[in-house]
Amino acid sequence: MTITPLMPVYPRCGVRPVRGEHCHLIDEDGTRYLDFASGIAVNLLGHSHKGLIGAIQRQAETLMHVSNLYGSPQGEALAQKLVDTTFADTVFFTNSGAEAVECAIKAARAYHQHEGNEERYELITFKNAFHGRTMATISASNQEKMHKGFSPLLPGFRYVDFDDLEGAKAAIGPHTAGFLVEPVQGEGGIRPASQEFMTGLRQLADEHDLMLVLDEVQCGVSRTGTFYAYEQYGITPDIVASAKGLGGGFPMGACLATEKAARGMVFGTHGSTYGGNPLAMAASMAVMDAVANDEFLADVRAKGERLRTRMEQFIGNYPDLFESVRGMGLMLGLKMKIEPRPFMVHLRDHHQLLTVAAGDSTLRILPPLVIGDAEMDEFLEKLSAGAASFAAAEAA
């Protein structure tokens, strides 16, 4: 047998974490890494948050799973907290971001079919987006690297350039059900949408009775400095897909919707065996208790500005490597003048700094939201040392 026990779909690196402490990961050989990847924007409270750990431990000792055949005091409480905190009137809990986006796609279609408009099933999506790895979510993206080997794709999606309002308007047709968009593209390179674009999509949705569906799987849950990024645009979505930070490391997601948008999601239309299990609900409630408040969100915004300012001051020292810093809150991208992956590997292997490569020649900087000045100082020291040694190696 030549295949590995773990199906070889990931090009796994040599880092093998076995323990986490606040903003650091410790390898099985004891090597200590500064984690500015956060499990790709998941571990927003770091790796040893007592409130999160305690909530999971207490719930695990009490009740972990019963299925959705029964009432859910834990799910009802968390759903109510999300409704009270956001635009939403109702919530469906999932196990992942891709499942949350799947639910959002179904809700958008179901709305129109519930209204008797069965021909309206197509979502306008945006190039270089990432919505997940299921058949529907790879079909919602134009990225051919995710399509290879899985054709034919599912119909019902039309691709338009990101941040192109006129293109989105021109794409509206008799089959259009709505728009599916990330307010800040994550895998696409930490690209925030413009105010004009987001406001314009909301207006187009209102004019044509379309669903404005936001994928906030990566940018949501306080990552950008507001609980969800849509708040910074002053708009109200119809549906939001959420996950990653929502569980703080425990796998879970949610599809949030207005009462209007959820009209078609009636008994028997959707389900999940594990979705909304008591253990996930306890984890997410602990996350919400920690991050869904004005003080914490203001702190994220302040940290984001400090980190951005220091990065902007730093990149001028290496004009051949770096172009700019972009993003919102603590969802930051370092736009590079070279392919970012070799630099990411160099930082990881030689300076024990974990980051994440993305599209558009961008290095993602996604620290836990609980970083302090000490972690910022350590990050800049490692980034500076890494840039110096990488530039020297390239020049040799």
Image (spheres, rainbow, N blue to C red):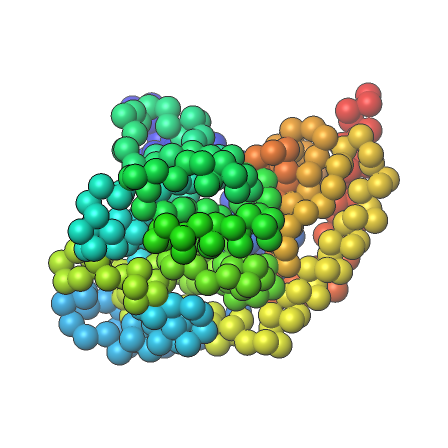
Residue at 29%, 25% in the rendered image? 151
The residue lying toward the viewer, choosing from 256 and 358, is: 256
| Residue occupying the far front of the picture | 207
Does residue 55 appear in the picture of this structure? no
Q: Is residue 2 left or right of residue 24?
A: left
Q: Residue at x 46, y 40 (%)?
A: 168
- Placement of the N terminus among the 4 image quadrants: top left
Front-most of residues 46 and 113: 113
Q: Residue furthest top?
A: 396
Horizontal side, residue 203 vs residue 299: left or right: left
Residue at far right of view:
317
Q: Residue 153: x and y, percent?
A: 30, 29
Left or right, 181 with respect to 351, comes to left
Quadrant in the picture for the C terminus = top right
In the rendered view, would you say 294 is above or below 321? below
Q: Taking 203 as reference, is 337 left or right?
A: right
Residue 350 seen by the camera: yes
Give percent across and percent down for residue 162: 53, 39
x then y, percent, for residue 67: 18, 65
Give how far across and how far down residue 30 sits, in percent. 60, 50
Q: Which of these two is toward me, 164 or 37?
A: 164
Using the image as rendered, state which of residue 293 and residue 232 is in the foreground.
Answer: 232
Number of numbered tags placed on the structure image = 0
Residue in the picture at 31% in, 60% down: 261
- Residue 387 vertical position relative to residue 255 in the rendered view, above or below: above
